[in-house]
Image (cartoon, rainbow, N blue to C red):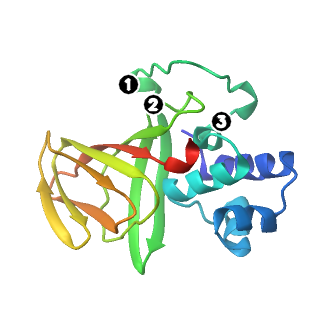
């Protein structure tokens, strides 16, 4: 499992390697200098969509930020991941739009640089109300439990086997329903990576 501290170290190392200042990265990502500084000091690890923006600003594949040993990352044509080899990312707690949220996820194709899609397993799926809005598209497929998905104010109740594909620039959110926490497959696609 990669730690929040290692993600912060990777971001700072890649920024310095590309000879960018925090101001340079701020201008490329639209994120504030103070927010980027907090990330680099491991005080605030953002959601994956923000990590993706940072990676684009650094000119690297987002999975490089999640790699425990960046120096050994190689360009590969295929990524085969056994269930017990998924890259687990520690539970994150953040506040988005005034609402707290907490989730943990496993990166499925973490060792494949240059990909246009980012697949994850989220377990449990988002527990609390928080809305996300970012460039790209997403696919959510419910693996276990029931999941309430909210998109642009409309709610959808999703059960095992249900899926939704959507433009992620529209505010969206989700939460588990019932006593069993939902587990979902989430695939993100960001146009800017192409």
Which residue is disc 3 drawn over? 68
Q: Is residue 29 above or below residue 68?
A: below
Give the number of callouts. Answer: 3
Residue that sits furthest to the bottom in the current view: 98
Q: Is residue 159 above or below residue 24?
A: above
Which residue is disc 2 drawn over? 86
The structure residue drawn at horizontal position 28% and vertical position 46%, both measured from the top left corner, is 140
Q: Which mark is residue 168?
A: none
Residue that sits furthest to the right in the current view: 19
Local secondary structure at mark 3: loop
Query: For the residues marked 1 and 3, what is the alpha-carbon distance in whole angstroms?
Result: 18 Å
Q: Is residue 132 visible?
A: yes
First reached walking from the N terminus: tag 3 or tag 2: 3
Quadrant placement of the N terminus: top right
Is 21 on the left or on the right of 127, as rendered?
right
Q: Is residue 174 above or below residue 163?
A: below
Crowd around label 1: few <14 · some 14–19 · many ≥20 (10 Å)? few
Which residue is disc 1 drawn over? 83
Task: Find residue 159 and report its horizontal and vertical position in percent.
Answer: 11, 48
The structure residue drawn at horizontal position 55% and vertical position 18%, both measured from the top left corner, is 77
Query: For the residues marked 3 and 2, what is the alpha-carbon distance in whole angstroms?
Result: 13 Å
Is 79 on the left or on the right of 6, as rendered?
left
Local secondary structure at mark 1: helix
Crowd around label 3: few <14 · some 14–19 · many ≥20 (10 Å)? some
Local secondary structure at mark 2: loop
Is 8 on the left or on the right of 194, as rendered?
right
| Label 2–label 1 contact, CB within 8 A | yes
The residue closer to the viewer here, 21 or 143, is 21
The residue closer to the viewer here, 130 or 191, is 191
Task: Find residue 22 and report its horizontal and vertical position in percent.
Answer: 79, 65
């Amino acid at each position: 499992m990669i730690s929040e501290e290692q993600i912060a170290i990777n971001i700072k190392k890649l920024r310095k390697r590309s000879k960018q200042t925090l101001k340079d990265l701020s201008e490329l990502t639209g994120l504030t200098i103070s927010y980027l500084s907090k990330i680099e000091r491991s005080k605030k690890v953002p959601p994956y969509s923000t990590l993706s923006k940072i990676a684009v600003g650094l000119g690297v594949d987002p999975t490089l930020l999640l790699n425990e040993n960046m120096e050994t990352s190689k360009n590969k044509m295929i990524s085969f991941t056994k269930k017990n080899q998924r890259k687990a990312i520690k539970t994150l707690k953040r506040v988005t739009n005034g609402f707290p949220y907490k989730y943990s996820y496993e990166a499925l194709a973490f060792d494949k640089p240059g990909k246009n899609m980012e697949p994850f397993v989220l377990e449990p799926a988002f527990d609390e109300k928080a809305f996300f809005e970012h460039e790209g598209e997403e696919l959510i497929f419910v693996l276990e439990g029931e999941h309430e998905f909210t998109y642009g104010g409309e709610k959808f109740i999703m059960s095992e086997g249900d899926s939704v594909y959507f433009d992620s620039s529209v505010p969206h959110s989700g939460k588990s329903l019932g006593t069993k926490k939902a587990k979902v497959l989430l695939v993100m696609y960001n146009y800017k990576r192409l």
